[in-house]
Every structure is written in C-alpha cells, then in structure tokens.
Image: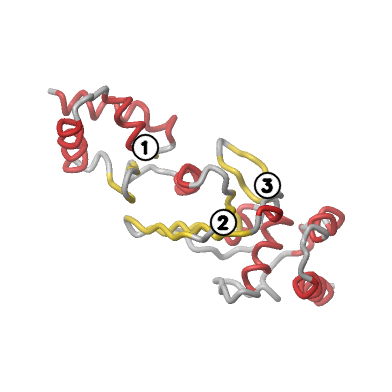
C-alpha cells in the first residue's frame, strides 16, 4: 500500500523535478523520519524501476530525466557548455547524446551513472560568465561555448567535431565575442582564437 502511494507521489512530482531527485527531495516528498525505513522505501522504488540511483545522493526517473538539470543540480554555480551548448545553438551538428559538459569554478569533476557521463570542468573565477538561464538550467551563450571549447581544446580535450572546420562561426555575435575575449588573460589563447576566426573568413 505504501509502495503504491510512494510511486504515485514520485510520478506526480516527476515533471516539476524534470526527473531529478536529491536524497533531500525524496525525504521531504515521502515524509519519512526514520533512516532505515527511508532506505527500505527507496530500495522498493528502485526494485520497481521507478527510481534509479545516478550517483550517491541523487536519483532519477530512468525514462524521463533531464541530464542538463541533473548537471545543474550537482553543481548549482555551473553552466552547460562545450558540445551540448554548441549543438543547442546549431553551431555544431554532432554531440554525444549521453554525455554533457559544464563549466564551474575550482577543480574538475566527473560523474558517471546509468550509462551517462556528466563532466564538470573547472576554470578560474573570472572566467565564470557568459550564460543565460532556461528552465532553471544555465546554458553558455554561443560565443562563450565557442571560447570554452577552444580553451579546453588547447588543454588537450578532444571532441566529436573538428574545431577548425565543423563549427558554424557565422552564427556568432562578433562584437560580443570580442568583449568576451577581452576577459581572458592568456595571450597565447587569445592569439589562438583569433587564428581560428581568421581561418574561417
């Protein structure tokens, strides 16, 4: 009886949560005060495939969770960038469907679960800018996603697309890009970006 009630509660809240639940979310939703009983109820939901554990402390609705939302909740100060953001803005056509990358301050971190990968790449505080918020998720602007992509390309990261030939650079706002580039303090990086832009003309 309690299991059926729990299933209904989870499914009812699923859309609002975009399929993503923290342990705290579930404790509040189920109203279970006893730790051992809470664990049993969560295990019962997992046994019914209503919930799946992504990483410690985080659960998802396996058929309908939003990977970008999960990424944002794992690191609230982050923003989605690189391939996912470029594809969303039609700057590039190819991206990994089960992998998403975000930018955050501090050290990089990787999360893997259920066949998905969330990669949080760390940058200095002054480079944490250039994003808009959509449905509670921060997304890099096209210009910042482009700069982030080149920034990590120079640090050895490789993509499913070629940074020299597969990017639709005509879609970028050049004045905004120039303003963004002025924030970067590494002359080598600035020169590299300008070289990529020159080759596209």
Instruction: Return the x and y of residue 194 as percentages of the image width and height.
Output: 82, 71
* Cα distance between the residues tagged 3 and 1: 24 Å
Task: Tell me whether circle 1 and circle 2 mark residues in contact (CB < 8 Å).
Answer: no
Residue at the location (59% across, 53% down)? 105
Pick out the residue farthest to the left: 1
Question: Element type at marker 1?
Answer: strand
Instruction: Return the x and y of residue 100 as percentages of the image width and height.
Output: 50, 57
* Cα distance between the residues tagged 3 and 2: 18 Å
Residue at the location (70% across, 62% down)? 146
Residue at the location (76% across, 64% down)? 169
Instruction: Return the x and y of residue 40 as percentages of the image width and height.
Output: 15, 36
For the C terminus, the image quarter is: bottom right
Residue at the location (60% across, 56% down)? 81
Q: Nearer the viewer, residue 81 or 169?
A: 81
How is colour applied across the structure in the image?
Answer: secondary structure
Question: Which label lies toward us, 3 or 2?
Answer: 2
Residue pointed to by mark 1: 21
Circle nearer the N terminus (3, 1):
1
Instruction: Return the x and y of residue 118 as percentages of the image width and height.
Output: 45, 56
Question: Element type at marker 2?
Answer: loop
Question: Element type at marker 3?
Answer: strand
Residue pointed to by mark 3: 131
Q: Nearer the viewer, residue 198 or 165?
A: 198
Residue pointed to by mark 2: 106
Task: Tell me whether circle 3 and circle 1 mark residues in contact (CB < 8 Å).
Answer: no
Circle nearer the N terminus (3, 2):
2
| Residue neighbourhood size for the residue with mark 2, other residues' Cα within 10 Å, grouped as few (<14), some (14–19), many (≥20) | few
| Residue neighbourhood size for the residue with mark 3, other residues' Cα within 10 Å, grouped as few (<14), some (14–19), many (≥20) | some
For the N terminus, the image quarter is: top left
Q: Nearer the viewer, residue 98 or 22?
A: 22
């Amino acid at each position: 009886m309690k299991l059926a009630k729990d299933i209904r509660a989870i499914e009812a809240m699923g859309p609002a949560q975009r399929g993503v639940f923290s342990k705290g979310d579930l404790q509040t939703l189920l109203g279970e005060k006893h730790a051992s009983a809470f664990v049993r109820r969560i295990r019962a939901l997992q046994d019914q495939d209503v919930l799946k554990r992504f990483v410690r402390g985080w659960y998802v609705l396996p058929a309908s969770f939003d990977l970008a939302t999960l990424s944002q909740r794992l690191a609230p100060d982050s923003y989605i960038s690189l391939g996912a953001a470029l594809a969303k803005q039609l700057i590039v056509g190819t991206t990994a469907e089960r992998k998403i990358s975000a930018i955050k301050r501090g050290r990089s971190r990787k999360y893997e679960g259920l066949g998905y990968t969330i990669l949080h790449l760390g940058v200095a505080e002054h480079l944490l800018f250039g994003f808009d918020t959509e449905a509670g998720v921060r997304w890099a602007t096209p210009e910042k996603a482009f700069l982030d992509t080149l920034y990590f390309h120079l640090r050895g990261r490789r993509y499913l697309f070629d940074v020299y030939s597969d990017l639709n650079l005509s879609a970028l706002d050049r004045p905004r890009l120039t303003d963004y580039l002025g924030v970067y303090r590494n002359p080598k990086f600035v020169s590299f970006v300008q070289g990529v832009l020159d080759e596209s003309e």
